[in-house]
């Protein structure tokens, strides 16, 4: 993940996240098909932009940091592929729903 963060830096108040992997096995040990697994709405922050600017031109700091786990909206964001991995998405900070502690 560190190599992706050094190659990719979001602009303004954008945040690059990597979705967590879907559960592929039930608690009882049964393997689940891909069609049965739903889209994961939790992700890890990989890179953050410097922040948006207010009307005076001063930067507004971003509330999430690299390594934070966040809750994503059901729809939105821009999916991108980095290093042959398509589980990355860019969101505006205001689109993120919550930090997961």
Image: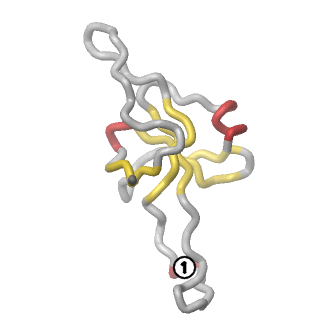
Give the side of residue 69 with respect to residue 63, left or right: right
Along the line of sight, the residue nearer the viewer: 95 or 25: 25
Q: How is the image coloured?
A: secondary structure
Q: Position of residue 96 (x, y in %)?
A: 36, 45
Eyeballing the image, is 13 above or below 19? above
Give the side of residue 79 with respect to residue 14, left or right: right
User: Label 1: few (<14), some or many (≥20) within 10 Å?
Assistant: few
**Residue at image location 67% in from the left, 31% down from the top:** 6
**Residue at image location 58% in from the left, 48% down from the top:** 88
Along the line of sight, the residue nearer the viewer: 5 or 91: 5
Q: Residue furthest top?
A: 56
Quadrant containing the N terminus is: top right
The quadrant where residue 95 appears: top left
Give the side of residue 93 with respect to residue 50, left or right: left
Along the line of sight, the residue nearer the viewer: 2 or 88: 2
**Residue at image location 64% in from the left, 35% down from the top:** 5
Q: Position of residue 19 (x, y in %)?
A: 53, 56
Residue at the disc numbered 1? 35
Give the side of residue 16 with respect to residue 8, left or right: left
**Residue at image location 37% in from the left, 59% down from the top:** 74
Number of marks drawn: 1
Q: Position of residue 57 (x, y in %)?
A: 33, 9
Q: Position of residue 30 (x, y in %)?
A: 59, 91
Regarding mark 1 in the picture, which secondary structure is present there? helix
């Amino acid at each position: 993940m560190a190599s992706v963060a050094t190659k990719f830096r979001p602009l303004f108040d954008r945040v690059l996240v990597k979705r967590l992997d879907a559960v592929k096995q039930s608690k009882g040990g049964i393997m689940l098909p891909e069609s049965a697994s739903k889209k994961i709405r939790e992700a890890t922050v990989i890179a953050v932009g410097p922040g948006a600017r207010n009307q005076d031109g001063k930067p507004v700091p971003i509330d999430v940091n690299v390594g934070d786990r966040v809750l994503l909206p059901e729809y939105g964001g821009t999916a991108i592929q980095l290093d042959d991995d398509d589980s990355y998405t860019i969101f505006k900070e205001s689109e993120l729903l919550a930090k997961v502690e």
